[in-house]
Image: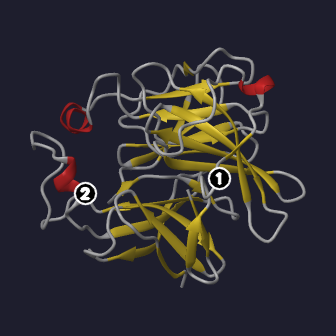
């Protein structure tokens, strides 16, 4: 994981760094087999819950060596944040999470884009259903939430009162009740781009970003078209950043960008001051631009 200084436009390695700090919370994460191998750990889908006195909890989708949600404490009370691994929740056998969200009580919701044994290429052609899984402190492991039957569920976010959760399903953003089973509440129309991650802005709007998938310079996606992940990732596409009103599901475009061979595959956006910071699933850099 990397630490980005938005003011200086610089980065440094946050974890594992020169020494990976680990102190397992065995009361909450006793079923976790121990800290991940830092040499194998691959992270994405970060979700942070702010705490008191500069301390927060960071939840990370982890691959490489094992499939798990990795949990870290973050101490930002000093001049530089310090990250300590505190536990994990293993994913069920054969499942790989994409994104995670955490409730105040420590409950985790994780999106699972693919059924066991299936590939992205198969999902693109067969419209395979994914799922949302839940784990709460004291549970033996993740269990599937009945209700959502989404196509390639991706980003996930919670309402401020935790009564609803939102996921990206295909090219739409969908709202569900945070009940068991979950009930479909409302959804956007299919968007003109492929939304990916979801983040709740300070104004209560859901923020998402993604590529324009139907782009003539790149291969067709979906239907009977053969899908190559390598070809998909290596063909630059324009991107769009949008805000979604979670109460009305009205979508408002707030930024866009052209196809760029240096930065492509946009998947997420975070507002930082007067700037938008845009991430990618297949790039060696982060983009930023003015919000205006």
Horizontal arrangement in the rendering, residue 122 relative to residue 81 (left or right): left
Mark 2 → mark 1, Cα distance in angstroms:
33 Å
Are the residues at dot 2 and dot 1 in contact (C-beta closer than 8 Å)? no
Q: Quick check: 276 above or below 218?
A: below
Q: Residues within 10 Å of mark 2 (few under 14, many from 20)?
A: some
Q: Residues within 10 Å of mark 1 (few under 14, many from 20)?
A: few
Viewer-nearest residue: 75 or 96: 75
Horizontal and vertical percent position of residue 10: 56, 78
Residue 152, located in which quarter of the rendered image?
A: top left
Q: Nearer the viewer, mark 2 or mark 1?
A: 1
Q: Residue furthest front?
A: 18
Where is the N terminus found, in terms of image quarters? bottom right
Which residue is depicted at the point 70% across and 31% down?
A: 107
Which residue is depicted at the point 16% across and 55% down?
A: 231
Horizontal and vertical percent position of residue 161: 76, 43
Which residue has dot 1 on it? 19
Q: Residue furthest right?
A: 53
Which residue is depicted at the point 74% across and 62% down?
A: 81
Viewer-nearest residue: 20 or 269: 20
Q: Quick check: 142 above or below 8?
A: above
Q: In the rendered structure, find residue 233 and report the number of the disc placed on it.
A: 2
Disc 1 secondary structure class: loop
Disc 2 secondary structure class: helix
Horizontal and vertical percent position of residue 275: 58, 79
Horizontal arrangement in the rendering, residue 29 relative to residue 100 (left or right): right
Residue 85, located in which quarter of the rendered image?
A: top right
Q: Residue furthest top?
A: 140
Q: In the rendered structure, find residue 105 and report the number of the disc placed on it.
A: none
């Amino acid at each position: 994981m990397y630490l980005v200084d938005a003011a200086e436009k610089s980065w440094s390695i946050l974890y594992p760094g020169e020494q990976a700090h680990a102190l397992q919370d065995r009361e909450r994460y006793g079923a976790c087999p121990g800290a991940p191998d830092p040499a194998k750990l691959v992270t994405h889908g970060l979700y942070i819950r702010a705490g008191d006195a500069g301390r927060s909890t960071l939840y990370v989708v982890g691959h490489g060596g094992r499939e798990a949600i990795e949990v870290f404490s973050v101490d930002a009370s000093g001049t530089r944040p310090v990250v300590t691994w505190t536990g994990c929740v293993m994913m069920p056998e054969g499942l790989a999470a994409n994104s995670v969200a955490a409730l105040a009580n420590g409950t985790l919701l994780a999106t699972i884009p693919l059924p066991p044994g299936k590939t992205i290429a198969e999902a693109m052609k067969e419209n395979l259903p994914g799922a949302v899984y839940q784990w709460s402190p004291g549970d033996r492991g993740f269990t599937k939430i009945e209700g959502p039957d989404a196509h390639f569920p991706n980003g996930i976010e919670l309402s401020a009162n935790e009564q609803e959760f939102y996921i990206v399903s295909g090219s739409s953003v969908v709202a569900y009740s945070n009940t068991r089973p979950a009930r479909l509440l409302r959804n956007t129309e299919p968007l003109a781009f492929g939304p990916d991650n979801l983040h709740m802005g300070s104004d209560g709007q859901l923020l998402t970003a993604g590529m324009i998938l139907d782009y003539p310079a790149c291969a067709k996606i979906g239907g009977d078209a053969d899908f190559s992940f390598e070809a998909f990732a290596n063909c630059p596409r324009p991107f769009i950043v949008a805000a979604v009103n979670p109460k009305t599901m009205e979508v408002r475009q707030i930024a866009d960008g052209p196809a760029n061979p240096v930065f492509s595959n946009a998947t997420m956006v975070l507002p930082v001051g007067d700037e938008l910071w845009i991430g990618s699933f297949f790039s060696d850099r982060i983009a930023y631009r003015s919000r205006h």
